[in-house]
Amino acid sequence: MKKILFGFILGLVALFLFLYFGGAKYLRTFGHKTEQAGEKLEGYEKQIKEKTEGAEKAVKETAGSAKKAAEKTKEKVKEYVGK
């Protein structure tokens, strides 16, 4: 019980000191910086999505041609093994 009461009092003191030494200004500045970082991250996200769409198309095309090549190889193997 003493630990809980001590923690509560310590929390109140910390909150008081935070507000006394300009905590609101710090929070406002921190929030503004966080918004700026979020906007930059959104820009990076768009760039990555655009680049990965191109890569995804290339992979699909390569996978299609690889399947065709594998089918041709299986047919050739069947021809040689069947002889």
Image (spheres, rainbow, N blue to C red):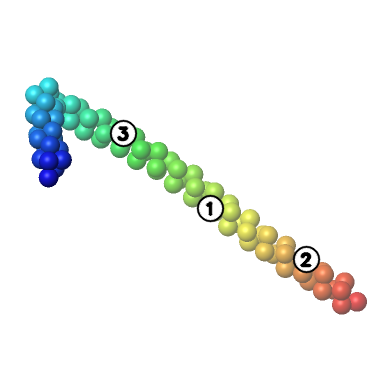
- Crowd band around label 3 with a 10 angstrom C-alpha radius: few (<14), some (14–19), many (20+): few
What residue is rendered at 52% in x and 48% in y? 54
Amino acid type, label 3: Ala
Figure check: 61 above or below 25:
below
Identify residue for label 1.
56
Identify residue for label 3.
37
> Which is in the foreground here, disc 3 or disc 1?
3
Identify residue for label 2.
73
What residue is rendered at 13% in x and 30% in y? 14
Near-viewer residue (54 or 13): 13
Figure check: 15 above or below 83:
above
Figure check: 55 above or below 9:
below
Tell me the SS state at disc 2: helix
Figure check: 58 above or below 31:
below
- Crowd band around label 1 with a 10 angstrom C-alpha radius: few (<14), some (14–19), many (20+): few
Instruction: Tell me residue 39's x, y (percent).
Output: 30, 36
Residue 76, picture quadrant: bottom right
What residue is rendered at 10% in x and 30% in y? 13
Amino acid type, label 2: Thr
User: In the image, 22: left or right of 41?
Assistant: left
Residue 1, picture quadrant: top left
Amino acid type, label 1: Glu
The dot on residue 31 is none
From where the camera sits, is residue 27 visible?
Answer: yes
Name of the residue lying farthest toward the front:
2
Tell me the SS state at disc 1: helix
